[in-house]
Amino acid sequence: MTHPDGGFYAAQDADSEGVEGKFFVWTPEEVTAAVGSEHAEIVCRFYDVTSEGNFEHKSILRRTLDLEQTARLFRRSVAEVAAIVADARRRLLQVRAERIAPGRDEKILTSWNALMIGAFAEAAKVLNDAGYRNTAERAAGFVRDKLHRNGRLLRTWTAGEAKLDAYLDDYAFLVNALLDLYEATANPSLVQEAAALGTVILERFEDREQGGFFFTGTGHEDARAPSEAGLRRLDPVGKLCRRSGTPAALSLSRRRAVPHRGGTCAPELRGRDDEEPLWVCQPDRRRRLLFPKAAEIVIVGAPQDEATADLTARDPRGLRSEQDHRRRRPGERDPPTGRRGQDADRRANDGLRLPRLHLLDARHEVGRARAAARTRPR
C-alpha cells in the first residue's frame, strides 16, 4: 500500500481469483510446505495458523504470542525462535508473491495520506520508533513534492499526474498531520508549512458572514458549498480539525494576528458532541494553546542528544493532556517571554491571552532527575 517514494495508495481489493482473502490466508499444510516440517509447528503457533482457521476456515497470520513466550513453550532459546520466525517470514513472503495479488487503487489522496502521516507520527512519539517517524516524513515529503502546484494544494495523484484543487478536508487534515509530525521530529519548518496551509484555509474557505467554513475554496473548479450543506459530505473529523489545527499552527508559528478566528465554527457545531463525540476529542489538545491557563514546555537540546531524547520520552501523553510541549534546538530564537512579550501577544490577538513558555534545558533537567533518583530512599 506504499508508493516507492513514500505516499500511500488509496485501497486494495479484498478478493483475488473471486475468493475473499485468498491472497492473505494460510492453512497448516501450506505453512509446512513453505517452511519445512522441522519448524512448521513453531511457525504455526507463533502466527496462529490452525486447521479451524480464524477466517473462512483458513488463517490470517497474527501474533498471539511473543518470541519469549514461544521460546518457553517449545523449550528453545529466544534467539533460536527469532531466527526460525525470521526465516519463515521470508519464505512465506516468497510463496505469497507467487499468488495472484488483489487489485489496488493506486490513487494517492492528500486527505487520506494526511491521516496516515498523523497516525505514524503519533505512533513514533508513543513508541519512540524511528521507523514510524521515517515513514511519516517520507509521506509528508511525497505530498509536499507531488501534490502542490503553483502554491496550491491538489487533491489526488495517480501515475505521475496530480490534479483537482484540494478541498477543505485536504487542507485541514494536512495541517494537523504536519503538527503531529513536528511534535515527533522537532523540525520547525513543519510548523511554518502548517501555518501557511492554515492561512489558506482562513483566506479561501472561511465563511465570514455566517461563520464556519466552506467545503470548497475561492477559485475552486467546483461551486462553493455552504458549510452546513457540505457538512454531511465530510468525515466528522474534517470540521473538528479546522477548529484546532489552524489556530494551533498559527500560534506555534507566531503568526498571532488570526488564531482565534479558527473558533468561528464553534456555534454551528454546538450540540453535536452527543451525536458525534469524535468531534470533541481532537481539538482539546491544541485548543489549549489558545486559553489563558495553557502552558507550553519547551525542551531545549540537540535532537540526537541522549538527554534530549530521555526528557522528551518521559510520559509524553500525560504531558500533552494538560500542556503542549515542543522541542527547540540550541541557539534557536525563543519567542518573547515576560510581561513585555505577553503584552505584545495580547495586542496581536485582540486581547487573547496566549501561553507563557517554560524552557527546560534537557541536560540540566535529566541530570537533576537522575540525581534525585540516586538519592531517593529505597
Image (cartoon, grey):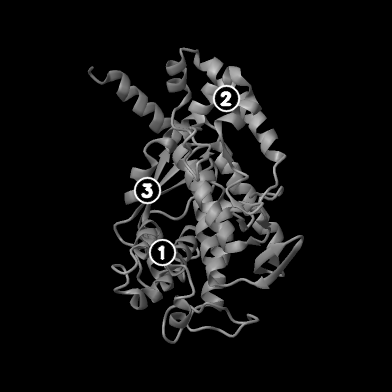
Q: Earlier in the sequence, mark 3 or mark 2?
A: 2
Q: Dot 1: what SS?
A: helix
Q: Dot 2: what SS?
A: helix
Q: Measuring from the top left, give residue 120's x and y in whole percent.
A: 53, 47
The circle drawn on residue 345 is: 1
Q: In the shown orientation, is residue 171 left or right of residue 278? A: right
The circle drawn on residue 85 is: 2
* Of the pair 132 and 235, the residue shown nearer to us: 235
* Of the pair 291 and 104, the residue shown nearer to us: 104
Residue 206 seen in the figure = yes
Q: Earlier in the sequence, mark 1 or mark 2?
A: 2
What amino acid type is highlighted by mark number 1? Asp
What's the residue at 64%, 27% (across, down)?
Answer: 33
What's the residue at 50%, 79% (across, down)?
Answer: 214
The circle drawn on residue 320 is: 3
Residue 83 seen in the figure = no
Q: Nearer the viewer, mark 3 or mark 2?
A: 2
Q: CA distance from mark 1 to mark 3?
A: 23 Å
Q: Dot 3: what SS?
A: helix
Q: Earlier in the sequence, mark 1 or mark 3?
A: 3
What amino acid type is highlighted by mark number 3? Arg
* Of the pair 352 and 326, the residue shown nearer to us: 326
Q: Measuring from the top left, give residue 156's x and y in whole percent.
A: 66, 65
Q: Nearer the viewer, mark 1 or mark 3?
A: 3
In the image, farthest residue toward the right? 160
| Placement of the C terminus among the 4 image quadrants | top left
Mark 2 nearby-residue class (10 Å; few <14, some 14–19, many ≥20):
many
* Of the pair 341 and 95, the residue shown nearer to us: 95
Question: Residue 209 lies in what quarter of the image?
Answer: bottom left
What amino acid type is highlighted by mark number 2? Val
Q: Measuring from the top left, give residue 80's x and y in whole percent.
A: 55, 15
Above-or-below relation of 109 to 316: below
